[in-house]
Image (cartoon, grey):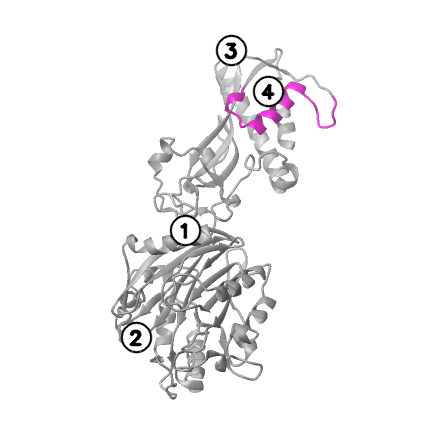
Amino acid sequence: MKFFFGFWFFCSLLSCSNDPTELWVNYADFPEMEKFFLAGVLNNGMLHDGTPEKLGFLVVDNPGPETVVISFERRRTDWKNEGAAFSQNFLFLSRICMVFPVEPWEEKNLSLEEITNGVISYTDLIPLHDLTPPHTALKIEGYDVSDAQYPLVYESGLSFSYGGKHKRRIAKKITALAYQIQQMIKNDLFENNEEKIEFDKRALRIEQRPVLFRIAAGGDVMLARGAEDILFDEGPEGILGGTAALVQGADLSLINLEGSISSRGEKAEKTYTFRFDPRAAPALKNSGFDAMLIANNHAFDFGMTGFYDTLDHLDQAGLGVLGAGRNIHAAAAPFYKNGSNLPVKVFGIASYGRERSGWDGLDFAADEQMPGILHAGRRGSELIKQQMDKGALNIVFFHGGIEYADYPDNATRSLYTDLIRSGADLVIGTHPHVEQGFEWVEGKPVFWSLGDYVFNEMDDTPGGDMGIFIVLSYLDRILVHIDIYPVFMDGPRTVISPPEQLDRFYRLTRTLAQK
């Protein structure tokens, strides 16, 4: 409570004159808890050792012509005003980032005009650091909480006014003494805020502009059927359309790569096989991707030779391999990325059944001496769970489920839930070739299926030529923003679709929330 002892010190010094200085506190402006503690200090006049002491000022019931008036002031600003300091009439106490909480399927817009006009009040908001599932933060006119122009930054403090004939002399004294209070608060209070402040934790919190960690992820990528030629000739914008900038702007970008990067190998006896030019690996790296999920049912489309070539080409390009390796331990190893305040670990794993052709992914599951994919049916989940780190953001990129299904099947739900309970902070699914909904599973975000991302000749399938591309913004483990972009496969090219395409995704998400 050093702030209030400092306030007593200020008030006693303020009265260092022959006659007590009249002081009036505009309690109507104070939040309840601040009002309670300040009233106790002013009315009781207790020193820190509990000794009664007559204060050298006179607390009056109404402001007179020569009364010092102290009011609580809260004002809305943005991060461009970060670092606000003491001014002559305002003692800066706190800066806090507030957010308007929404559920991910809520299609809501909020303008700065509505905030300014009081349609949304301060009491409708919550502190950014108090954001918890099932809510994320609404962007305001496109600005996220880390943007310099984000408009829900609130500063609070004490304002001083004096209306008497000695206004200039008193104002100078107020300025000097209030500055001393500010230094006392800064030096003695904020260093151990949680231990020393017992009232509303918004009251004396100074926050800096947050640094978000952005994760971008697309679903199934298949570069045959003309896609790789566009990638080589036109670059990422030619094949990824508007999502190319999202990939490049993220701190971590992930996709599921369906096929072998190789010019060798024997074609597998299965319904569909895909193989890409070795130039695809550096082209994907140059597009901004960081890691590829290889734990899928196309990793062995061109046998062990094609599989080894894929691992080599991705490694040479500097791309992380998720869920595949030269043995089960390599396949279970995470891809590491440095986050803003904590490390990020990304795991890859698969679980899918036998294909109509008879090809079975379990036959290509990695083992102690066997190269292959990390399969949930062959110790895959257990090895991932052993490596979950409480000091990291743990992400699992999953390939499994039933193709073209609207909702996850029970086996997939059980697998994802088990990973969440074991420490996964985020699970992203692929394989069904259509988008499924979003769901909070025990407070952690799960995207059951992103659908297709780059996959030509899917226009004859029930929804296979559409998908979603996601950008998730994290503050440590707090999922602050979810940005969902509908994508459409216009032949080999991917384009961002009109927002109406998200109707299906939101419908599926709402249904999951009601179950």
Of marks 2 and 1, which one's residue comes earlier in the chain? 2
- Which residue, given by chain and number where applicable, does mark 1 sit on? 510
Picture residue at 49% right of the left edge, 13% below the top: 164
- Does the stretch in magenta take in 39? yes
- Which residue, given by chain and number where applicable, does mark 2 sit on? 228
Cα separation between marks 4 and 2: 76 Å
Of marks 3 and 2, which one's residue comes earlier in the chain? 3
Mark 3: which secondary structure?
loop
Cα separation between marks 3 and 2: 80 Å
Mark 2: which secondary structure?
helix
Q: Is residue 78 above or below residue 220?
A: above
Of marks 3 and 1, which one's residue comes earlier in the chain? 3
Mark 4: which secondary structure?
helix
Image coordinates of residue 283 in percent, x first then y, are 35, 73
Cα separation between marks 3 and 1: 59 Å
Disc 2 marks a residue whose amino acid type is Glu
- Which residue, given by chain and number where applicable, does mark 3 sit on? 64
Image coordinates of residue 134 in percent, x first then y, are 48, 48
Disc 1 marks a residue whose amino acid type is Arg
Please state which of residues 353 and 325 is positioned toward the viewer in this rendering. 353
